[in-house]
Image (tube, grey):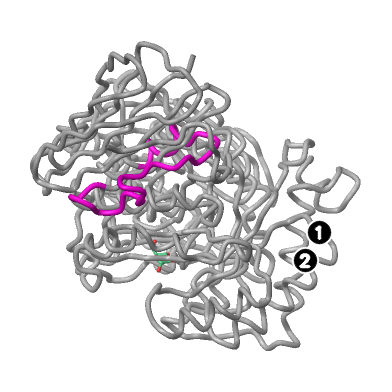
């Protein structure tokens, strides 16, 4: 008999315990959640016309030039100069692996231009993959702008749906025109914000009710080298002045071809804070600690040149929380958010380790705690979590009283099962743990071969019961990575997969969602023969009560290939109502995947429970994860 001590809280569950990890990897931001449809809109990719092609009737010199003005505009040096003579010619943008177009939807075009005299006319088209025109409008830039850039907008509505359309501009008339920031967004962005985010992808996050959103990564925080690290100040303000970077994931990785992958920062730090606020999550920014990716260059900033890095951290807190009379609080207000964002925590470094990390971390910690003692700092435990390097670093971080230690693990399913009791023996009253990245990798050396099958999600669920049971120590956790585009990924598995028009959650998505939407407020003991349930007969369990909804919530993973019937006894004064339910995830095939065609092949099913007295008989299907909700009277 499983006994649940319903009246005795053994730990508090932090309201933000289950969160999400966002990184621009696998086309997560550009080409993903950031809804811009034009690839290389400002001609700043390594090859200036990457993503674009010019189609003419006859070859003519000088019709299209990419001009570089880096001496006067370092953030956005290049623009396109179109010199029209007689023949029409066409400029086509291929989009990010095509452009997803929906029938009946409006598409909003914008560009910056300048011209000495008007004369050039532009026809804007969306063309289906088979070249059929599926949206069209015309635009004649009328202003004589001289040297000043002017913005012009237009809209076109699609007559057909096509996931792999392209965007075309046909130039007619005579004259010269300079163009930059050629942009196209669907009308149906999240909250209909102009130049905003893909609503279907944000909705998947909102549905999880994540406690926090960690951003912007991951390795992109560190960069391959320091010049290419993530710098939040370059990601706010007018999009034409956000200096873009080659994405650190623009690499041939895991046997996939290298994508043309850049960070335009259209989704920048202001938008990340706004996203967190929209979906009711705490913002958890991670900042570079003066060290580039240690798997790559291992470049570090000299200790006596760390000031700008530390200043970025201090300024970010002021940007998020400062009142509007402070320098950075004023900036936030000018961007449209006078109210503070209520930042509570920040990560210093991503996967960094060694004495060089500890030295730099100490400098950050001293400066931040002196000015903002209330901000909790997340410290990196490098990668691991096995081995001496990990243990040494963790001991040093604990000795230094780290607020949070960020553990990452990408390990096989059996490691997850074996480690479900991992935190039962962790020191209770020292640093807290943030399991900042984890996922089951069947083979951690061949990242591309890993799949989000039911086996990986079920093993993660088993481990997560151990995180929940130890919610006094493990106060936050996030699966990683979050998003992947089916035509442009570098790393798998990932929680949510998208193409240009659709999105589906993997079995891992449903496990994560079940935990975060059933987090409760207080951990209570669930035992069998006075022992925590960690793998006996393949079962893993945890239980919480929810003070707000007055319920008991039990989570049980059955990792065995057989139905298991268990008796459950509720030990406590609380009476229960006559109806509860189970949200069940199950599949007899551990290799089962979800897909666009079968998005919920593994998806939650709700089963009503009739309750009488305090004894229950539960039937747990083979390979199932069960969340049982029992309302108290
Ligand atoms: O989640 C993918 C990568 O894994 C992250 O960028 C990095 O932090 C980790 O190594």
Image mark for residue 372: 1
Q: Position of residue 599 (x, y in %)?
A: 21, 33
Q: Is residue 447 magenta?
A: no
Q: Quadrant of ligand 1?
A: bottom left
Quadrant location of the N terminus in the rendered image: top left
Q: Is residue 426 above or below residue 301?
A: above
Quadrant in the picture for residue 25: bottom left
Residue picked out by circle 2? 368
Image mark for residue 238: none
251 left or right, relative to 212: left
275 left or right, relative to 148: left
Q: Is residue 538 magenta?
A: yes
Could you say which is closer to the camera, residue 209 or residue 59?
209
Residue at the extreme right:
325
Q: Residue at x 61, y 73 (%)?
A: 398
| Distance from the alpha carbon under mark 2 to that under mark 1 | 6 Å
Residue span colored magenta: 512-539
């Amino acid at each position: 008999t499983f006994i649940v001590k319903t009246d005795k809280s053994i730990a508090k569950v932090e309201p933000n315990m289950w969160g999400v990890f966002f990184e621009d990897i696998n086309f997560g931001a550009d080409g993903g959640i950031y809804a811009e449809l034009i690839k290389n809109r400002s001609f700043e990719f390594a090859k200036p016309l990457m993503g674009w092609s010019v189609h003419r009737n006859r070859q003519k010199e000088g019709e299209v030039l990419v001009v570089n003005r880096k001496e006067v505009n370092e953030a956005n040096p290049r623009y396109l100069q179109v010199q029209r003579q007689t023949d029409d010619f066409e400029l086509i943008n291929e989009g990010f692996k095509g452009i997803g177009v929906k029938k009946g939807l409006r598409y909003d075009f914008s560009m910056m231009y300048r011209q000495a005299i008007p004369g050039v006319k532009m026809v804007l088209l969306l063309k289906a993959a088979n070249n059929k025109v599926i949206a069209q409008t015309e635009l004649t830039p009328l202003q004589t702008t001289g040297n000043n850039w002017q913005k012009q907008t237009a809209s076109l509505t699609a007559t057909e749906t096509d996931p792999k359309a392209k965007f075309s501009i046909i130039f007619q008339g005579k004259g010269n025109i300079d163009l930059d920031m050629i942009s196209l967004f669907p009308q149906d962005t999240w909250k209909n914000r102009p130049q905003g985010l893909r609503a279907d992808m944000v909705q998947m996050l909102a549905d999880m009710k994540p406690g926090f959103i960690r951003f912007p990564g991951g390795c992109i925080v560190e960069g391959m080298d320091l010049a290419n690290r993530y710098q939040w100040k370059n990601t706010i303000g007018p999009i034409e002045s956000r200096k873009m970077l080659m994405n650190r994931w623009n690499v041939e990785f895991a046997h996939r071809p290298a994508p043309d992958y850049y960070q335009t920062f259209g989704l920048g730090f202001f938008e990340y804070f706004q996203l967190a606020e929209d979906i009711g999550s705490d913002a958890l920014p991670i900042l570079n600690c003066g060290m580039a990716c240690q798997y790559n260059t291992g470049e570090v900033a000299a200790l006596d040149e760390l000031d700008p890095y530390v200043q970025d951290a201090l300024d970010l807190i002021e940007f998020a929380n400062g009142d509007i009379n402070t320098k950075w609080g004023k900036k936030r207000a000018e961007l449209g958010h006078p109210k503070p964002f209520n930042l509570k925590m920040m990560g210093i470094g991503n996967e960094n380790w060694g004495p060089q990390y500890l030295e730099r971390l100490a400098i950050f910690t001293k400066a931040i705690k002196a000015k903002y003692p209330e901000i909790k700092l997340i410290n990196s435990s490098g990668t691991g979590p096995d081995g001496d390097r990990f243990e040494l670093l963790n001991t040093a971080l604990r000795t230094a009283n780290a607020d949070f230690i960020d553990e990452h693990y990408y390990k096989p399913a059996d490691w997850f099962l074996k480690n479900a009791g991992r935190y039962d023996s962790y020191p209770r009253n020292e640093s807290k743990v943030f399991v900042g990245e984890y996922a089951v990798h069947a083979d951690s050396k061949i990242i591309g071969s890993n799949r989000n099958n039911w086996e990986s999600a079920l093993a993660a669920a088993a481990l997560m019961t151990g995180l929940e049971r130890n919610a006094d120590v493990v106060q936050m956790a996030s699966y990683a990575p979050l998003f992947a585009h089916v035509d442009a990924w570098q790393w798998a598995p990932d929680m949510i997969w998208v193409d240009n028009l659709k999105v589906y959650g993997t079995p891992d998505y449903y496990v994560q969602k079940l935990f975060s939407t059933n987090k409760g407020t207080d951990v209570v003991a669930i035992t069998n023969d006075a022992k925590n349930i960690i793998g006996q007969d393949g079962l893993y369990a945890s239980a919480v009560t929810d003070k707000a909804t007055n319920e008991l919530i039990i989570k049980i993973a059955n990792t065995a290939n057989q139905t298991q019937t268990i008796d459950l006894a509720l030990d406590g004064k609380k009476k229960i109502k006559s109806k509860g339910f189970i949200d069940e995830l199950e599949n007899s095939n551990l290799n089962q995947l979800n897909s666009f065609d079968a998005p919920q092949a593994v998806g939650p099913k709700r089963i009503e429970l009739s309750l009488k007295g305090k004894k229950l008989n539960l039937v747990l299907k083979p390979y199932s994860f069960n969340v049982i909700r029992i309302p108290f009277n």
